[in-house]
Image: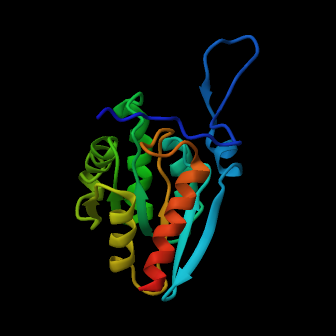
Amino acid sequence: MEKSFMPLTNETPDYHFDHDVKESKPLDSETLSSQVKSEHIKSINDTNYYFDMSGISPENTAATLNSFNERLLLITGSDSVDLSQASYDLLGSVLIHKVKHLILIGQTAGLIELSLMKRLTGKNKGIDIRITRCLTLKQAADCAYLCAKPGENVLLSPAGSMFSGYSSIEELKNSFIECINSEDES
C-alpha cells in the first residue's frame, strides 16, 4: 500500500515573496518570532501541553522554542522529504538550549537528531538531552505523558509541512488533542 503525503497548510506563511524575485526567502528571526502561534491545549497533572500552529518549517519550530523560557519536552518530525540537512541545522542549535527530551516522529527524525548531535560537541559536550523515537503521534504523546514531570511543558511542533495521514495542520492538532485527552481519561 502506497502512502500519500499531503502538505500541511497554515494561514501564516513561513516564507515571503518579493514580486520581482521568483524564489522564496526565509523570514528573519524577528519576523519569525512575531508569527509564533503556540497554543495551550490543556494541563494534566500540572504539565502543560502546547501545539505550534506555525511549526511548518524548522525555522518556525526554532522560533517557537525560543518563545519558551525553560527547557521542555518537544515532539517533532514530519514527512517533509524535500528539506535538506542544512534546513535543520539552525534547529539543532536551538534544541541544545530549549529541549530536555526530544521525541521524534516521521521521516525527518534522523535529520533532526543529526542536527542536534552535531551541536553536542565542544562547549556543549555533556549537555543531557534525552532522545526517543516513536512510530506514531499516539506513541509520542504517550511518551511525553509518561516522562513529563509536574511544572514541565510539552510542545508538538512538526518542523515540516508534510505529515502522512493528515491533510492540514488543524487536523494534526486535533489528533494531538485526542491523544492528550485520552491520557487525561486514563
Residue located at (66% from left, 56% from top): 37
Give how far across and how far down residue 153 sits, in percent: 49, 74
Q: Is residue 179 left or right of residue 168?
A: left
Foreground: 47 or 68? 47
Q: Position of residue 161 (x, y in %)?
A: 51, 39
Q: How is the image coloured?
A: rainbow
Residue at 25% of width from left, 49% of height from top? 117
Dividing the image into 4 quarters, which one contains the C terminus? bottom left
Query: Taking the image as drawn, is residue 66 in sight?
Result: no
Residue 32: percent from left, percent from top:
64, 45
Say whether residue 10 is visible.
yes
Direction right: furthest residue: 19
Q: Nearer the viewer, residue 27 or 110?
A: 110
- Identify the residue shown where x is 59% and y is 77%: 42
Answer above or below: position of 12 versus 104: above
Looking at the image, residue 91 lies above or below residue 156: above
Residue shown at 29% from the left, 35% from the top: 1
Left or right: 172 in relation to 84: right
Rendered image quadrant of residue 128: bottom left
- In this orientation, which residue lies closer to the viewer: 56 or 178? 178
Left or right: 83 as drawn, with respect to 10? left
Count up the numbered dots: 0
